[in-house]
Amino acid sequence: MRKLLFPALLILALVVTACGGNQKSSGGETFTYESETGPVDVPKNPRRVVSLSGFTGNLMHLGVPVVGADIWSKNAAQFAEKLKDVEEASEENLEKLIELDPDLIIALSTAKNLDKIGEIAPTVTYTWGALDIFNMHIEIGKAVNKEKEAREWVDNFRKRLEEAGAKIKAKIGENATVTVIEVYDKAIYVFGDNWARGTEILYQEMKLGMPEKVKENALESGYYTLSPEVLPEFVGDYLIISKYANADTSFQDTETYKNIPAVKNGRVLEMTGEGASFSDPFTLEMQLDLFEEFFLNSP
Amino acid sequence: MKLTGRPRRAAFGWTMAAGLAVMAVMFAVSLVFGAKDVPLRDVWLALFSGETNEQILVIREIRLPREIAAMVVGAALAAAGAIMQGMTRNPLADPGLLGITAGANLALAVGFAFFPALGYFGMTVAGWIGAALGMLLVLGLGASRRDGWSPLRLVLAGAAVTFFLYALAEAIGIAFKVMKDVSMWTAGGIMGTTWRQLAVVVPVVAAGLTVAFLYARQLTVLSLSEEVAAGLGQRTVLVKAALSAVVILLAGVSVALVGSMAFIGLMVPHIARALVGTDYRRVLPMAAVAGASLLLLADTLARTISKPYETPTAAIIAVLGIPFFLIIARRGGQRS
Amino acid sequence: MIPKALVRKQRLWLFGLLGLIAATAVISMGLGYASLSFDRLIPTFLGQGTFKEEFVLFSIRLPRIAITLLAGMALALSGAILQGVSRNELADPGIIGINAGAGVAVTLYYLFFPIDAGLFLYLVPAIAFAGALAAAILIYLAAFRRGSGLHPLRLVLIGAGSSIALNGLMIVLISAAEPQKADFISKWRAGSVWGADWPFILALLPWLIVLVPFVLYRAHRLNVLELGESEAIGIGVPITRERAALLLAAVALAAAAVSMTGSIAFVGLMAPHIAKRLVGPRHQLSLPISVLVGGWLLLVADTIGRNVAEPEGIAAGTMAALIGAPYFLYLLIRR
């Protein structure tokens, strides 16, 4: 009797497991997307996408269901409502990631554990800054099978930008200059024309002017660290500040700052730092609205 | 060693004068050089006249408070270190080694996690309290009934308490998601010091230094031997308590202002003692002056080495400090 | 020579601990954010689990359990050596500055070289070891005196001071780094087990395979060294060379462990203590027990830590400090 017990148990175990779930849910057909790292088989109709960094806004705008998002996106003001019920996902917590049961994962090329992440679900990575913001959006659109929608938005938005640019220039003058800085922790950074925070749409699309000093120092490298001592030299006719909540803004109390022409004339726009570094449609549209209001209504 | 008193005193006078001169020069240098070099004339005007122009404003509003902070913090930390080394008869004592920064760090974590509305001043006070607690823990646990603060116990207690408090801060930081805020504060640096902050810091440091100086004679005796001090009728408990309070005050306010700045309290007293001997009535002022000069120098270097980037001042001091520490440790056995 | 009863006691503890470790490992395998409950463990082991279950067990939890065990063992052994050689029951590779030395090396490397997921990861253990060794050598040199050799007290004193100093340096370096890198370094300092994959385990294993027998073989020498200078000289043990060899082993063990798991202190402190409480002071008996206790302790710390908070929980090193530091301080007071 004893001898039969063990094999019986084994068989029972096998039967039970056979009845239980089996392979990973593939949810339908796939197509091959040519990503940075080679061809990836991605679902034609992604239903559970996890965004590990940076591109959450793009995905949401394309109407893709996002079930897991990175903490920075969740903290961004413009996404707080939309991502309220979305779980926080991180490249470090693989257990949570697999528990979310994604069918597509979008991440930055510098993410950790990419090989393991790639085992959980088809993973597409992008290098930040490899493509300009519009082509990036189109690429993402391609990866989730929404290329047409992506291109549509890009074309419309660029048209809108052209019009806005003309209107603004009409108001502030052909040669007026704008400076974009960000205050993060105790440092001040000034940006060139391709480092988010609205710089692409201001300089590249609307073709607004950039102060000489900014061109010299920030155009090539993308950004430049400033000391509050030299800030005045970099500020043009208009100043846009991306401010993080916990940043040290004591420099704004100094006479040096208050004597900057742009500040004296009330031509300063402050926007929240959290989320300003994204370049997705939601963020860009929000920034465009802010900018239009600012330029057209300031003294 | 000379046996007559007078030559020594004269020598001290000259040394102090030289020290003050060095400090003045460093002060000027720190104001002139920076992300943008300002001509000496403008510096003069900024300090002594009411005139304004762009350069002068920069000096007055941004550099001047910062360099004054450097002087004050340098002096405070150096004095705190000197007192600690004297009190514990341990050449390796330094406020950073004894739980102060760790305590401040923990207090900040708690502050950010549970009282996010505290604001700058509140956080400073919290940091202060934390620093005090950290140091009290270390001093308390590092003392043994038999022989007071042996160097070994103190440093070990310091290490253990530091680890523990950091771990605790870490746990709180992760659980309440305030890690970034805390580390930003602790790695702070002198940047962005405002006149308002100085209004608090300068009087406190001045008070601390004064009290320390009042006890300097007793400190000297204590630094030689506990028994001798007691034998001479000194109320050692009172003296130690007062001096500990001063150390907490000086170190705590420094950490709250500029974050973690280790090694000043370690290195400078040694330099001071090498210059003026072991009488703490001389060592303390010398240490204060030397500490101020050192931090001014380090800060100037920090701002100019890789313009316009700011190398953290603390890094420069650490680079100087670690070899210094090892050399002292190697040689230092005789004096403990 | 060693009383049979004592040996038997030790053997019992050895088996007991192995059992304890196995049980804890099983518990750890069943705990975590993803749902892999205990009743699914055996089926998954037998290859009958879903993809998700197999992934969680074999790619996430098991490697982590394995590396934690190995690291804990290495740290315990390192601590035991340090305590024996320095004749100071308060020694631990974390407190003495070995971890900090490794940390500074890793931090510097990380600041100057880009985060390339592939290549970088495999170089870090080597870098960590180089750093730990450099720190150890500097500390050793600072503590060594030509006349009197290596005074144990000075070693601990200088080591502890250096540890805090180097940690301070790391904090400063963090502040100069980009947020991404700064994040990694902070996690390293906290001892979050980042090297939890099979290749890392394979990298760590050789160290243990070589060093553990090496040390165990010399266990009796440790007994003598612990007695004291004159006794050791009297018995004819070549102290300085012996000490140096053992210390080198201790550094290597600690550095290897720490390079995989980040800075973890106090395991090397507690494990030898507990071992000695269980089987007495003879190192032939206590070293193997130390090793097992260390592995178990770290496993417990990590298991609790990673399940306590989101998203990655509290680092093993932090847990170890939270448990270990009070214990350490208690020892300090009691002295």
Image (tube, rainbow, N blue to C red):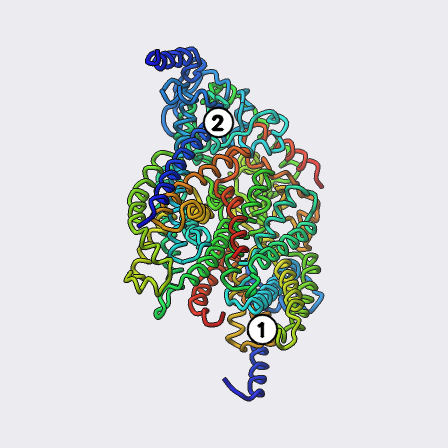
Residue A287 lies in what quarter of the image? Answer: top right
Which of the pair B132/C185 is nearer the observer?
A: B132
What residue is shown at x 58% (from left), y 35% (from top)? A275
Chain letter behind tag 2: A
Residue holding disc 2: A97
Q: Nearer the viewer, mark 2 or mark 1?
A: 1
Check disc 1 and give the amino acid type.
Glu
Which quarter of the picture shows residue A113? top left
Describe the element under mark 1 as helix, strand or loop: helix
Residue A193 placement (x, y as % from top left): 52, 40
Q: Is residue A22 left or right of residue B221?
A: left
Q: Horizontally, is B92 left or right of A173 in the view?
A: left
Name above or below for residue B58 compared with residue C78. Answer: below
Question: In the image, residue A236 lies at what x, y percent?
Answer: 61, 47
Looking at the image, residue C125 lies above or below residue B255: above
The quarter of the displayed image where residue C222 is located: bottom left
Distance between the alpha carbons at the discs numbered 2 and 1: 65 Å
Q: Identify the residue under disc 1.
A: B227
